[in-house]
Image (tube, helix red, strand yellow):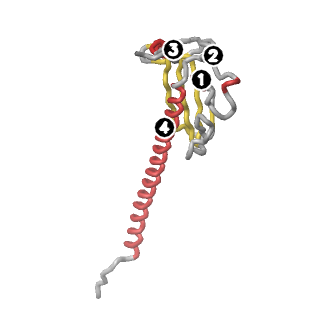
Amino acid sequence: MTLRRGISLVEVTISMVIVSIMSMGVIQMTAVSARTRALSTDRVRGLALANDLLAEIQTRHWADPDSGVGSFGVRVDEYDGTTRTAYNDIDDYDGWEQSPPLQINGDPVPGFEGWARSVSVEYALVSGTDVVTSGSFETGKLITVTVLRNGRLVAEVSAFRALAWDQAEAGALPPTGEVIE
């Protein structure tokens, strides 16, 4: 009787099953990795978009310079339907939403089709390490900027702004046109 050396059909089949199972695992890991990378990239881009708008808002007065502390929200003469150039205080941004995001002058922010930004401004008070919101406090405002991509939340940033900060800034600066020696 002669002995044959070689691979049987059963051994080939078992090897193919093992390689197929391992390949499926690698493919799934690659897909998860790509999805995680895309979510991470969206988060970084969303945070940049949110922080850009938050920085813009924080350059505005705490209260409307024309209407005073008692007014809240955007006046009709401050919004032209596209730009934010006439916004002069923080709460002008309350309830503001835009998709796709536009720059302050109304030009589109390049590369952000399918993205949206919104802003919420509420009266707030700092109590220890907590920020408490209510419609009745008039010493601070909590600004929250939310960024969505295709309807999915990718970033949300908040900042607290105190009325005392504006008052201190106003007291520290000379009147317009006065020169500091």
Instruction: Please indicate whether residue 108 sits to the left or right of residue 163 in the image.
Output: right
Q: Residue under label 1, please give it.
A: 88
Where in the figure is residue 112, as x and y percent of width and height? 57, 44
Taking the spot 60% from the left edge, 42% from the top edge, the residue there is 108
**Comparing labels 3 and 1, the label whose residue is closer to the camera:** 3
Instruction: Please indicate whether residue 10 sits to the left or right of residue 75 in the image.
Output: left
CA separation in Å, label 3 and label 1? 18 Å
Question: How many neighbours does mark 3 have within 10 angstroms: few (below 14), some (14-19), or many (20 or more)?
Answer: few
Q: Which disc, if any, is residue 48?
A: 4
Question: How many neighbours does mark 2 have within 10 angstroms: few (below 14), some (14-19), or many (20 or more)?
Answer: few
* Chain-order first, disc 2 or disc 3: 2
**Comparing labels 2 and 3, the label whose residue is closer to the camera:** 3
Q: Secondary structure at mark 1?
A: loop
Q: Residue under label 2, please give it.
A: 66
Q: Which disc, if any, is residue 175?
A: 3
CA separation in Å, label 2 and label 3? 17 Å
